[in-house]
Amino acid sequence: MRVAIQVSELRYATEDGVLVLDGLSFGLPGDGFVVVVGPPSSGKTLLLELILREKFPTGGQILVLGRNMARLSPARARALRRRIGYMPEGPVILEGRTVQENLEFKLRALGIPPQEAREHRARALELAGLKGEEGRPASTLNLLEQRRLLLALALCPEPAILLADDPFRGLSVEGQDEVMAALHGVHELGVAVLATARDGEVPARHGFPPKDRAPLLKYAVYLQPDRSR
């Protein structure tokens, strides 16, 4: 079975010696969907930064599509990074542009040819639930619609892995369920999904059992401040 991400005995301490992650191990299969749950300061965003090689672990290792990100050359790391869609928690939307222009800006920056870019854009808008909203100014989107645009951006171009940093935060239960449904739609097309959440009710409501009582493909990993399991 292809493994999208393998985290093994991961450890991370800050420069002043604060241990944030210690001994964290789990795997995301190539056709899997995992939710990492934890309160603020438990290391959820940090974990995604380590996977993306924005930071480096103190110990342990992270394999992404079979490659150790920490050991890759910068050029090879950038190439591998393009196979990962990232949906950050903070806003990265260009509010002075329309929904479509936000996607076009990213695709141009990646050097995607125009015809191919149109295909990627149309697919991403449909999967994110924004089809028909292309001409709307990004500044007029509500919080749920902003999350949908972040998802569409993460899907341009087509990734092998999707990382979503607490896309449920601040939403109503109905909004959380809509985001989860969109993530499941992406997963059903063969994209491995790793999402984080501060509210354990979100994955529980959608059938994600804890890691130690779970099937291989779909489960939740729980983090706590100063320890992980």
Image: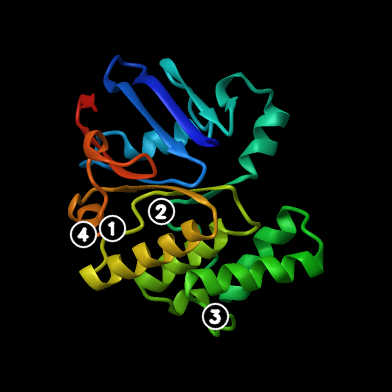
Q: Residue at x 47, y 56 (%)?
A: 187
Name the residue tied to disc 4.
Answer: 205
Determine whether the residue tagged by mark 4 lies in a helix, strand or loop.
helix
Sequence-wise, which precedes: disc 4 or disc 2? 2
Q: Which picture quadrant has residue 158?
A: bottom right
Check residue 169 in the rendering and tell me which mark sits there, or answer none: 1
Numbered disc in front, either 3 or 1: 3
Q: Nearer the viewer, residue 152 or 15?
A: 152
Sequence-wise, which precedes: disc 3 or disc 4? 3
Q: Residue at x 41, y 73 (%)?
A: 145
**Looking at numbered disc 2 in the image, what kind of residue is underneath it?**
Gly
User: In the image, 70: left or right of 221?
Assistant: right
Sequence-wise, which precedes: disc 4 or disc 1? 1
Q: Which picture quadrant has residue 23?
A: top left
Measured in 3D between alpha carbons, the distance from the residue under mark 3 to the one under mark 4, in whole angstroms, is: 27 Å
Measured in 3D between alpha carbons, the distance from the residue under mark 3 to the one under mark 1, in whole angstroms, is: 23 Å
Sequence-wise, which precedes: disc 3 or disc 1? 3
- Give the position of the C terminus as an image quadrant: top left
Q: Nearer the viewer, residue 80 or 53?
A: 80
